[in-house]
Amino acid sequence: MKRVRASLSYANVVSTLCLFVLLGGGAYAASKLPRNSVGTKQLKRNAVKGAKVANRSLTAADIRGSVHRAESAARADRAASADRAAAADRAASAELLGGSPAAAFLQSSVVARAHSAVTIAGGGRTDPLLRMGPLTLQANCENTGLAIYVRILASTSASGGRAVWGSSGGSTGAIELSGTPQTTVEQNATSAASASGAGDLLYIDPTMTISLDFAYTASGPQQSCTIDAVALRA
């Protein structure tokens, strides 16, 4: 013991105490902290991460501010997007309607456009032209080699139906219609010439009236027939 005491010095004692504190003192201090002794002042800024927060431990009051502003911004973005989409739809509809309201246009059951264009080297050909109510119209083109004929054939499924027509090409008439197609308008041109004209056809039966404005061309050089028409149901 005398030998040990003789080797002790102030520096040796202090060094030994420091080593003890470093190795065991920190663990002791951490394990002996009083309850609720660590507060916001002891925590570094941004020291607590989201993964360290217990699920469902925060309330809306705890996270007011930026979250609420983000939600408001998201709602504003959704509302703005919906407004832009609605405005685009209105613009597209206005463009399709030429800027006019839908009420300015007639329904397809009331008005219809008809068109037929046929090139034929020889013989005859009949194609559908228009069907409105009980009235059926067909376009007929015939190439006899000497002339090209263009015709409008009419038939009806209603009893008591009649057709009255006239054209600038001199084709006029009035006939009783039935379920069998009958020639109403006829125009022809020689194989070396073309003929064109326009006119109107009126269909009448006990329940309705249909008026048809038409234009036609019979072309011998092109061996073709064309008919364009607009029908209006009253």
Image (cartoon, rainbow, N blue to C red):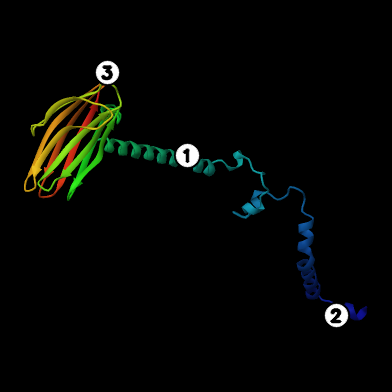
The location of residue 230, given as percent across then percent down, is 21, 32
Decide which of 20, 51 is in the foreground and name it.
51
Q: Quadrant of residue 177?
A: top left
What residue is drawn where x is 78% and y is 71%? Answer: 19
The location of residue 228, given as percent across then percent down, is 18, 38
Q: Which residue is mark 1?
A: 75
Front position among marks 1 and 3: 3
Kind of residue indicated by mark 1? Arg
Q: CA distance from mark 3 to mark 2?
A: 138 Å
Q: Residue furthest left?
A: 192
Q: Quadrant of the N terminus?
A: bottom right
Q: Which residue is mark 2?
A: 7
Kind of residue indicated by mark 2? Ser
Is residue 100 at all visible to an observer of this figure? no
160 above or below 222? above
Q: Which circle marks residue 206 in the picture?
A: 3
